[in-house]
Amino acid sequence: MNSKFFEGINFGFSKNVPVVLQTELTECGLSCVAMISGYYGANENLTDLRRKFPLSLKGMTLRQIIEVCGRLHMSNRAVRVEVEELRELKLPCILHWEFNHFVVLKAVGRKTVTIVDPGHGERKVAVSELSNSFTGVALEVWPDIEFKKTPPEAPIKIRELTGKFHGVNGTFAQIIGLALSLEVFALLSPLFMQWVLDNVIVANDKNLLNTLAIGFIFLILLQQGIGAFRSWIMMYFGTSMSVQWRSNVFRHLMSLPISYFERRQLGDVVSRFGSVDSILQTVTSSFLGGVIDGVMTFITLIMMFLYSVELGLISVSTMLLYGLGRLLWYRPLRESTSETIVRGAKTQSHFLESIRGIKALQLFGKQNIRVSAWQSLVVDQVNAGLKTQKLQLLYQQWNGLLFSLEGIVIIWVGANMVMESALTVGMLMAFNSYRSRFDGRVGSLIDNYFSMKMLRVQAERLGDIIQTSPDENIVLDERELEKLDGSLELKGLTFRYAQGEAAIIKRISCAIQPGECVAIVGKTGSGKTTLLNLILGSLKPTHGEILLGNKDLGMNGPNLVRGVTGTVMQDDVLFAGSLADNITFWDNEIDQDHLDYCINMAMLKDDIGKFQMGLNTLVGDMGSALSAGQKQRVLLARALYKKPKILILDEATSNLDVNTEAAINAGLRTLKLTRIVVAHRLSSIEAADRVLYIEDGCLLLDTTPKLFFETGIYRSGSSPSGEAGQIFA
Ligand SMILES: Nc1ncnc2c1ncn2[C@@H]1O[C@H](COP(=O)(O)OP(=O)(O)OP(=O)(O)O)[C@@H](O)[C@H]1O
């Protein structure tokens, strides 16, 4: 019978469920699938899974998880079970959790069950508390006949993460050289005690004592000098590496697609970026320390064996036990460290979100809810940290016991040897000194090795930034951009946010001529912003193509279209700085005439005239010092300052009064540029040459404003509440 058949049967042997933590906000389902497929031997990488099964920001449904399992050749069965029936399920399986999350059920005990939560890691939940979170829906998953095992991927190499450093190789060699010379001095110091005990005291030789003391004082001064020089170089080396590496990572982060940021919490991205420092700290101290410790351990060991083979063997055995202890502690320590970091990132996200949304919180009087939610996140974080500390505490006790016992055994055996005249007292003292040096060195060598291994947690988190590819962009030639005339063509454009979800844009085709003004209208949620995001390259079409001039956007990357468009989007922001900075986007050589022209076009002149500091007025954090209408007009001026060939406005004048809006529209009409405007207001639609009416993602009408109004789709009327205005039929 096929071995796959047996793999599908639960014999109750406990293989390990690999912990795959989710990186994006909504990929808990995908992480659960990755964990179960890993349990059966197919180590699916979450990044690859994400690529194969794109998710929308709305998360994954059970139906989508079943589809993914099917595509990965895993059979499954969705069942409705009571808490008491959980032990009858085939484990590991997926549980629906708190109506918005999925977790893996790993084991069912008498009083507790073990779950692996893709958000935090493994934990035990009391059976009595299970019904608070478990919705009663479970998905059993097991491999089918075509299921293929794949070996786990090699962990990310630190070198892959760092990128290139300049001018550090020479410094690195210098540091190693200085550190080694320091160690040679350290190796000589036990001889002082040995010579004093064996030669000075026995022979009552004061002259020799003085000579030895002066010699060793000189040695110590030299040692201190070299030590200070090494620390200074280390400081220089560490700082320059930190600046270079952080710049490399930040540059890469800035080039990532917009979707990367939409799918992650702010605090999580900040915490991942912070991994650079943790890695750098460990790499500089552990790696450097590791090289030096390795060399010195070897030399010290030779010295010890020269004194006594028996005593040397006792020390080596102790170190083997120490290494074994470190190995046993590694996995639990790694998991608890990882959980501490993830929980820390969650707390930070909550904190940043609360600060950003402080106004809404205060207006709704909901600060207390936010505070208690934050407190419970902090408690989780502290508990995870305590777990790590408890493990370390146990480990330290183990080490203390081990080394104390070793000390007693060495003195006991050594004293016997002295009594049998196999060693002198001085030699025993010197040996003991070398032994404590050896213990320290090997201990730190082993610790450094595991610290480097532990870096995997940080490296994987940072890898999420580094290993995400930036948007593919061809290098832009200014002359190519010059040739573009501002025409645009959409051919059979279809888009869905995720596989298995309904299409939001459905087979839209239309051509927009240079200089034309097109209004995109439709009910709220009909897909207008999504269409603009497709045109701007922020989203990639599922089918169809977009041509700019005669250039295919898909082939050229978003920089092409972004090079010729000026945009004001619904969620656009201003940055801390002056009005002039924001409008010119920190242009080094401000074109004052053009700046004045854009300010006039955006009807900002009067407002700026009223500000005491004129164009140097600060806009506050994200434009908080401006009114909503002023902010929209600054954004419009910023878009125009770019001298675009295509102007894209997504409800960019919605906060303006009708007169100001009409004046701006009249001004824009005089410009020679293509305009694509999403608007709900009658005046903005009237100002357009053409109207594209979108309903439920389909382009239903492509006509003139006059004919559009005649259809009666958008007409004067009153809303159900009796408010008069323009409404969709
Ligand atoms: N990132 C996303 N993931 C999944 N669905 C999304 C995402 N963004 C938007 N949608 C969905 O796509 C649909 C169209 O949204 P879109 O923002 O394009 O509508 P719209 O016509 O611009 O609406 P409005 O007039 O309210 O701005 C909506 O149902 C929305 O819920």
Image (cartoon, rainbow, N blue to C red):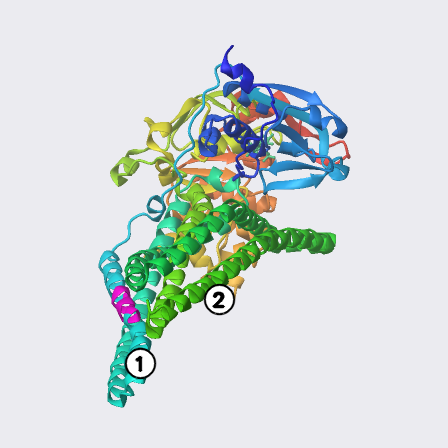
Q: Position of residue 86 (x, y in %)?
A: 71, 28
Q: Which mark is residue 196?
A: 1
Q: Quadrant of the C terminus?
A: top right
Q: Residue at x 52, y 31 (%)?
A: 530
Judge from the rendering whether residue 190 lies leftward or rightward of residue 728; answer left or right.
left
Which quadrant does ligand 1 occupy?
top right
For the question of whether residue 699 can be seen, the reply is no
For the question of whether residue 112 can be seen, the reply is yes
Q: Position of residue 66 (x, y in %)?
A: 59, 21
Judge from the rendering whether residue 333 lies leftward or rightward of residue 151; answer left or right.
right
Q: Position of residue 608 (x, y in %)?
A: 50, 59
* View extreme (bottom): residue: 206
Q: What secondary structure is found at the residue carrying circle 1?
A: helix
Q: Position of residue 625 (x, y in %)?
A: 56, 59
- Closer-to-camera residue (269/68): 68
Q: Examine the rendered structure and indicate whether residue 462 appears above or below residue 425.
A: above
Q: Which residues are magenta?
A: 179-187
Image quarter for residue 240?
bottom left
Q: What secondary structure is found at the residue carrying circle 2?
A: loop
Residue that mark 2 sits on: 613
Mark 1 belongs to which amino acid?
Val
- Closer-to-camera residue (484/40): 40
- Magenta: main secondary structure equals helix
